[in-house]
Every structure is written in C-alpha cells, then in structure tokens.
Amino acid sequence: MGYDYYSSPAVVEDGSSADAPDPWGSDYRQNTRPGHRLPHAWLHHDGRRLSTHDLLRPGTFLLLTGADDGDWSRVADVIAERFDVAIDCVRIDEDTWQGLRGHDDAGALLVRPDGHIAFRAPSAVAHHEQAIAAAIGTALSARVPDPA
C-alpha cells in the first residue's frame, strides 16, 4: 500500500507535493494525487451502498466529478468517442468523499482502468475538453487527436 506512479509518463502531474511516507509502512494515508490508487470511500449511488472501487470497470476510465459537474460529463462523451475508449462519468456529492477527493465541487478526477488516478483538476478548468483529451492521451501514451 502507498506506492504511486506520480512521475510516470502515464499520469498528468499536478504539481502537488507528496506526504512523507511512513518508513515502516504502517501509516497509509489515502489521497487522490495523480499516480496514486483511487481511495476507498463508502457512497450511496443509484440507491445502493457501494465503494468508490465498485465504480471501476475493467477496460474503462472513470471520471469522478463534484456537485458542479460543469461540462465534465458532456466532454467525457466527446473524448471517449475521439479516442475510442470507454469513460464512465459519476457525479459524487457526499461528505464521506469530500474529505478525500482532492478537488472542489467544480473539479474532477480521471481514474485509469487499473484504478490509479491519471489526472486531477482541483477546481474548474477553462477548457474541459483539452484537459480530458490531454489526460487520456497521456494515460494511453498516445498522440492527442485534433478536435473534429
């Protein structure tokens, strides 16, 4: 527990600093810093109690947004088609998640299919489509297609 891929070419670094690791490995602190594993939190989604990890599907990216989804969901559909990938978009506005998510209500997290954070927008961005396209391109180590 606690390993990360922050400096990997498959994640978008956000300039955040890491907590000092516990040399004994007994103190694990969940976070949403790019390259880290998606934190676990209990949620209520579609009338069910489930974990954030239950939202992950094999081969599918996961875009988690706050209460102010803005254009994230719409843009996820456009980018999924452009890159020919699956992106599930889930809006979460629960107290249990707010302490872990690392972004405000207008921000978002893009989670790779392996459950690691590929991209984090701590707050609203000016160009949602460019941000998600760059993050997917980075995660796939692909050239970002020109917008149609």
Image (tube, grey):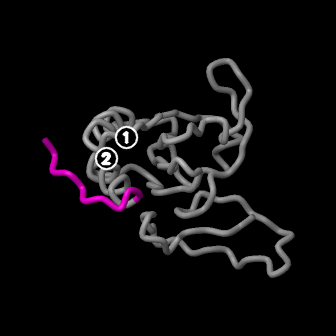
Picture residue at 49% right of the left edge, 75% below the top: 7
Location of residue 93 in the rendering, given as x and y in whole percent from the top left corner: 59, 35
Residue at x 57%, y 51% (from the top left corner) = 114
Q: Is residue 67 left or right of residue 25?
A: left
Q: Give residue 119's position: percent from left, percent from top.
A: 45, 57
Instruction: Count neighbours of disc 1 (C-alpha within 10 A) and say few if under 14, some if 14 to 19, many if 20 or more.
Output: some
**Residue found 31% across the figure and 40% down from its top:** 84
Position of 87 compared to 2: left or right?
left
In the image shown, does 17 or 144 lie closer to the viewer?
A: 144
Q: Which residues are magenta?
A: 139-148
Q: Which label's residue is closer to the chain start, 2 or 1?
A: 1
Q: Is residue 50 left or right of residue 23?
A: left
Residue at left offset 26%, top offset 52%:
130
Q: Are marks 2 and 1 in contact (CB under 8 Å)?
A: no
Q: Quadrant of the N terminus?
A: bottom right
Q: Secondary structure at mark 2?
A: helix
In the rendered image, the residue lying farthest to the bottom is 23
Question: Is 92 or 89 nearer to us in this picture?
Answer: 89
Task: Pick out the residue farthest to the left.
Answer: 148
Amino acid type at image mark 1? Val
Q: Which residue is mark 1?
A: 85
Of residues 50 and 67, which is closer to you in this image?
50
Amino acid of disc 2: His
Residue 119 versus residue 113 in the image, above or below: below
Give percent across and percent down for residue 140. Answer: 38, 56
- Foreground disc of the pair 2, 1: 1
The residue tagged 2 is 128
Main secondary-structure element of the magenta-colored stretch: loop
Eyeballing the image, is 40 above or below 13?
above
Q: Secondary structure at mark 1?
A: loop
